Amino acid sequence: NVEPEPRSLSLGGHVGFDGLPDQLVSKSVTQGFSFNILCVGETGIGKSTLMNTLFNTTFETEEASHHEDCVRLRPQTYDLQESNVHLKLTIVDAVGFGDQINKDDSYRPIVDYIDAQFENYLQEELKIRRSLFDYHDTRIHVCLYFISPTGHSLKSLDLVTMKKLDSKVNIIPIIAKADTISKSELHKFKIKIMGELVSNGVQIYQFPTDDEAVAEINAVMNAHLPFAVVGSTEEVKVGNKLVRARQYPWGVVQVENENHCDFVKLREMLIRVNMEDLREQTHSRHYELYRRCKLEEMGFQDSDGDSQPFSLQETYEAKRKEFLSELQRKEEEMRQMFVNKVKETELELKEKERELHEKFEHLKRIHQEEKRRVEEKRRELEEETNAFNCRKAAMEALQSQALHATSQQPLRKDKDKKKS
Ligand code: GTP
Ligand code: MG
């Protein structure tokens, strides 16, 4: 069932829907814009200075120490206004990046932060009462990755971090403090960096070339990546004009001089030409990927053509049923486990009881035996005592007879004496 092509008609006169783009502009201006920049680079590489230079103001930032025990993300939001356009700008600093001895997990807090902002947005979208219209969108629109001006090559930390971030955020790599590297070295350094990014499969943000109005400039600028920038908030007199520059004993590096560095190119691309594309890519590419993975993880699926069309209600019901049956299974398992445990304990108790009973019987037997033996002994002793008593009585009788006999003898002796 292919829908027929709509017929094109010509209008007889002015109708007025050609003012629709103006309505959009007016609405967006009233609503204001938000733009969120993530700055990743070693401590002291010039992140804050570059932000101040880019927006021509002084953001209050404190310097980081070199002794953080892990990377920490510090977001700060500012309300900026230029003519009648309001910009809610959030600058997120990856504090302590590159300062740890073990840098294996340096990228993790950054990835987690980016994901957390996506998750917040997804939660808002999934709410029943959503207020996306005045929602403060904190999703990171661009990551400025500051590369040290070593003139040598990218560090493995740079490659690992950019690789981990490239599917989550638009990365624009920049060579920081480009005034510390000579012109010929810089050219070679840029080529080397791009080569390393390509050979490691790191996807950096490409300025879009599909919109005719900006296709040409964007194509030229893509060839200049990574931009080599110089930041400064100091003003120096050049000719009869005050310009932002860095003054050295041998000369002045002008920030906005395209012969000196790519600062102007960066500002042009980041703020003046592609800010909306960065916001759009964040929503339609990076956030979309996050959302898709998250929803698939939760069990949602799009229909695959011939099957039923996707229904949130059905998926929810299916998930709910799955969950309930799982719960029931778990409950039954627990119950069974409990019953088994009770049975086991009961058996154990019975066994213990039997053992105790046996012990008791054994002791009883021993006791009876002992008692019998003692009784025997007692009887023997009694018999002995009786025998002894008998003998004693006999002895006493004999003794008394003997005594009696001896008491008669002297009389007879006396009689015998008298006779003689
Ligand atoms: P943390 O926030 O502490 O990590 O530092 P940061 O990356 O914000 O660096 P910050 O902007 O504070 O600059 C550190 C030092 O580098 C300051 O002394 C700046 O003047 C100097 N600096 C900043 N940008 C440039 C630059 O483009 N070239 C040179 N040569 N020095 C710079
Ligand atoms: Mg700083």
Image (tube, helix red, strand yellow):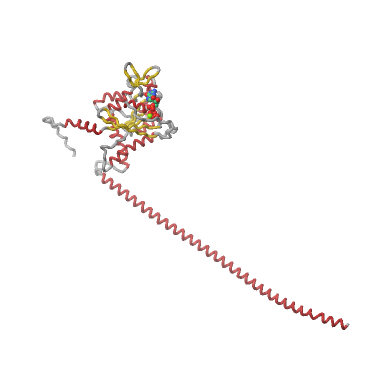
Of the pair 120 and 282, the residue shown nearer to us: 120
Quadrant of ligand 1: it is top left
From the top left corner, tell me how far across and down residue 11 is, in percent.
12, 31
Quarter of the rendering occupied by the N terminus? top left
The reply, left or right, for residue 17 in relation to residue 75 is: left
Where on the picture, by quarter, is residue 209? top left
Which residue lies most toward the bottom here?
Answer: 419
Which residue lies most toward the top here?
Answer: 239
The reply, left or right, for residue 345 in relation to residue 285 is: right
From the top left corner, tell me how far across and down residue 130 is, in percent.
26, 41
Q: Is residue 387 above or below residue 53?
A: below
Of the pair 46 and 153, the residue shown nearer to us: 46
From the top left corner, tell me how far across and down residue 4 is, in percent.
16, 36
Where on the picture, by quarter, is residue 409? bottom right
Quarter of the rendering occupied by the C terminus? bottom right
Q: Is residue 396 above or below residue 20?
A: below
Q: Is residue 260 above or below residue 3?
A: above
Where on the picture, by quarter, is residue 415? bottom right
The reply, left or right, for residue 201 in relation to residue 304 is: right
Which residue corresponds to the image point at 50% horizontal and 62% vertical from the top-left?
356
Of the pair 231 and 155, the residue shown nearer to us: 231
Query: From where the camera sits, is residue 123 visible?
Result: yes
- Circle count: 0
From the top left corner, tell me how far across and down residue 150 is, in percent.
41, 24
The reply, left or right, for residue 162 in relation to residue 16 is: right
Which residue lies most toward the right here?
Answer: 420
Query: From where the camera sits, is residue 147 visible?
Result: no
Which residue corresponds to the image point at 26% horizontal and 37% vertical from the top-left?
134
Of the pair 304 and 352, the residue shown nearer to us: 352
